Amino acid sequence: MAPNPRPPAARILVVDDDPGVLAFVQDVLSSLPVQEIVAVERGDRAVSLLGREAFDLVLVDLRLPEVDGLGVLAASREADPDCPVVMFTGDPTVETAVQALKQGAADYLVKPLGAGALLAVSERLLEAGRLRREHRLLRRRLDRPPEFRKIVGDSPAIHRTIDLAARLATSDVDVLIVGETGTGKELVARSIHRRSTRKDGPFVPVDCGAIPGDLLEREFFGHVKGAFTGAEARGIGLLEYAHGGVLFLDEVTSLAPPLQAKLLRTLQERAFRRLGSVREIRVDVRVISAANRDPGELVRAGKFRQDLYYRLNVARVQVPPLRERREDIRPLALHFLELVDPGLSFSEETLEVLAAYPWPGNVRELENVVRRMAAVAAGNRLEPEDLPDEILSEAGYRDRVPPRGFLDLREAHVAAFERDYLTRLLRRTGGDVSRAAREAGLPRGSLYRLLKRHGLLPSAFRKGGAGPSGDPVTPA
């Protein structure tokens, strides 16, 4: 994927008791990719902020009332040892510099401040901090069990979920996964399966809410010939298919009460009977279930069997909603865009809008929005105006994006048609540009210009290459 035009916007804290210095620093640093510059005149106020909020860079004067610059430096080091601190000093002696550096300052600047030096030091330290964070996040991802690396995110909330699920994977207990719709419960279930001793067995998913109630029992247990009208042959149920592996019951709370009772007996005995049969069949199966609301609430409301709940809830994994792991929105959006079209990138403002939206549909909604944006984008960079209106409004950005006129919308739809047509053409021709040009009725030069405009590489579609989804290209 093409790199973003600039790094993630930073939060900077500036502390100086001279309002003129604060204004000067804010003015100079506004040229950097800055999300917010917080300026305060007192050291005690800075210490209070550092205890509550995260910053990417702190610039502080050595001489301050109440709490001096070294006190602010100590508070910053305690709150976040990776956040660089630059000291301002009007005393250009070696002793002052050594004292600041010994206590952990990343650099120091002598007053009166020069714009060039201030900008250079700040830019260097912000970039170094970004690289440190990226290295730390990459290290944490690599430290994950490989079966869980498909789960994108580095927030503490998702790490807690992964750590617990990874520990449960190596046991053989039944697991209940609870999380809102679209949070990725099935991905967690599949990761547990891949890490378990049953990894070579089948993973059989069942959407309990999608199968009509009168068919669900037949789907679960199978049937013998003649069990009902139209049963002209024996039918194998999902439980039998899952033998030696995992039966994944998605939206398990939608099961009808009669089936809840039969499922309870099956889980207790690990045995069942096909419809129309008296012969008992024993199965070796692990059950992983998922629910988009706490089944305990339904038990208290009398809508779900308490004994079945206890049987399913031997171990429990909670998958957090996306609004509780907002720091994962950026990597998730970049991941989905890479899958859809590596030739596209997000503007920084677009990523800020995505981070401000509450995502009631969670990760699934984010993926759908990224796909929609890629389909209608007019250029290679996705801008806020490519977002749906409801997201702009909910995130508070609607008034900041001018309405798109007829020509803009026509250009966006033409670009989406071109990208879709060219992608299908390259897939069909296996990346053979001459053949693609003949099929499209275009000169080779014109086709190459179109491919370049949309960031499509013919070599990516040739045998053994990767298409715009990043997956190996195989014949349809």
Image (tube, rainbow, N blue to C red):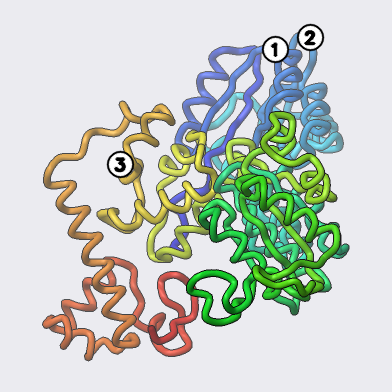
Residue 317 in sight from this viewpoint: yes
> Which amino acid type is shown beneath numbered disc 2?
Glu
Q: CA distance from mark 2 to mark 3?
A: 48 Å
- The residue at 81%/69% (across/down) is 196
Q: CA distance from mark 1 to mark 2?
A: 7 Å
Classify residue 94 as left or right of residue 203: right
- The residue at 70%/72% (across/down) is 277
Marks 1 & 2, CB-CB < 8 Å contact: yes
- The residue at 60%/46% (across/down) is 254
Classify residue 433 as left or right of residue 465: left
> Which amino acid type is shown beneath numbered disc 1?
Arg
Instruction: Please tell me how crowded label 2 is: few (under 14), some (14-19), or many (20+) other residues with Cα within 10 Å.
Output: few
Q: Which label number is shown at residue 42?
A: 1
Marks 2 & 3, CB-CB < 8 Å contact: no
Sequence-wise first label, 2 or 3 = 2
Q: Which residue is mark 3?
A: 385
Instruction: Please tell me how crowded label 1 is: few (under 14), some (14-19), or many (20+) other residues with Cα within 10 Å.
Output: many
Classify residue 447 as left or right of residue 128: left
Q: Which residue is mark 2?
A: 66
Sequence-wise first label, 1 or 2 = 1
Classify residue 191 as left or right of residue 448: right
Report the mark closest to the observer, 1 or 3: 3
Q: Nearer the viewer, residue 363 or 402?
A: 363
In this view, 274 is above or below 438: above
Q: CA distance from mark 1 to mark 3?
A: 41 Å
